[in-house]
Image (tube, rainbow, N blue to C red):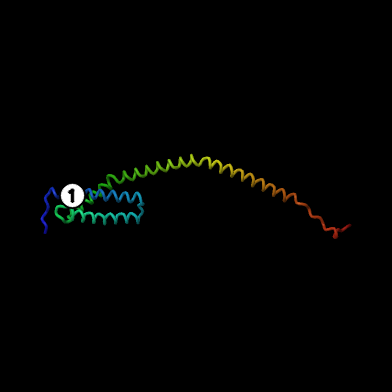
Amino acid sequence: MAAAPALWAVGRDLLWCLGLGLLLGMFRSFAGLLLGNGRILCFVWDLLSFVAAAVLLCGFAASASTGGGTRWYMAAGAGAGALAWRWAVSRTLYRLAAGGAALVTGAALRLQGVFLAPFVHLKRHFAARKQTKTAAKAKKRAEKVTKKKKQLQKPRKILYN
């Protein structure tokens, strides 16, 4: 059984793992923002976050920690960092992203209205001209039907009284 590290070493390891947890929470939030957060995607992001946490904790324990092994307080520090990101920063980040998306969408709609307004006017003008032409053609067709010549009897079959 390995000896317990000194208290200052535990504090340093805990602080490093807290930072790793914050980093994991940040990557999880950005993955959800950029690639979506549906049911399946949320499960995938969470699973990838847990795998990344395990890899990072083992890597940290092997390379930088005082004791050389993964301890319970390292996992607790990483979990606390991820929860701190979720509770303190994630909601604000999502609200800022939604506000930014609303601003960009509003600006794009305004620009679309400004740049496409002449074309919409032309489209309406051509549609009105086409409608008047179609109405004139329909009127001519109606006149042709009413002005149809009457067919007389054939000359060889004319009957007299």
Q: Quadrant of the N terminus?
A: bottom left
In the rendered image, residue 112, in percent from the top left (x then y), is placed at: 47, 42
Q: Please identify the quarter of the rendering in which residue 40 is found.
A: bottom left
How many marks can you see? Answer: 1
The residue at the point 46 percent across, 40 percent down is: 111
Q: Secondary structure at mark 1?
A: helix
Viewer-proximal residue, 82 or 53? 53
The residue under label 1 is: 14
Viewer-proximal residue, 150 or 11? 11
**The residue under label 1 is which amino acid type?**
Leu
Q: Residues within 10 Å of mark 1 (few under 14, many from 20)?
A: many
In the rendered image, residue 155, in percent from the top left (x then y), is placed at: 85, 58
Tell me: 128 left or right of 53: right
Viewer-proximal residue, 8 or 68? 68
In the rendered image, residue 68, in percent from the top left (x then y), is placed at: 15, 55
The residue at the point 64 percent across, 45 percent down is: 133
The residue at the point 65 percent across, 46 percent down is: 135
Tell me: 19 left or right of 34: left
Viewer-proximal residue, 68 or 98? 68
Q: Quadrant of the C terminus?
A: bottom right
Extreme residue in the front direction: 63
In the rendered image, residue 22, in percent from the top left (x then y), is placed at: 25, 48
Tell me: 59 left or right of 90: left
> In the rendered view, would you say 92 is above or below 43?
above
Extreme residue in the bottom direction: 157
Q: Please identify the quarter of the rendering in which residue 56 is found.
A: bottom left
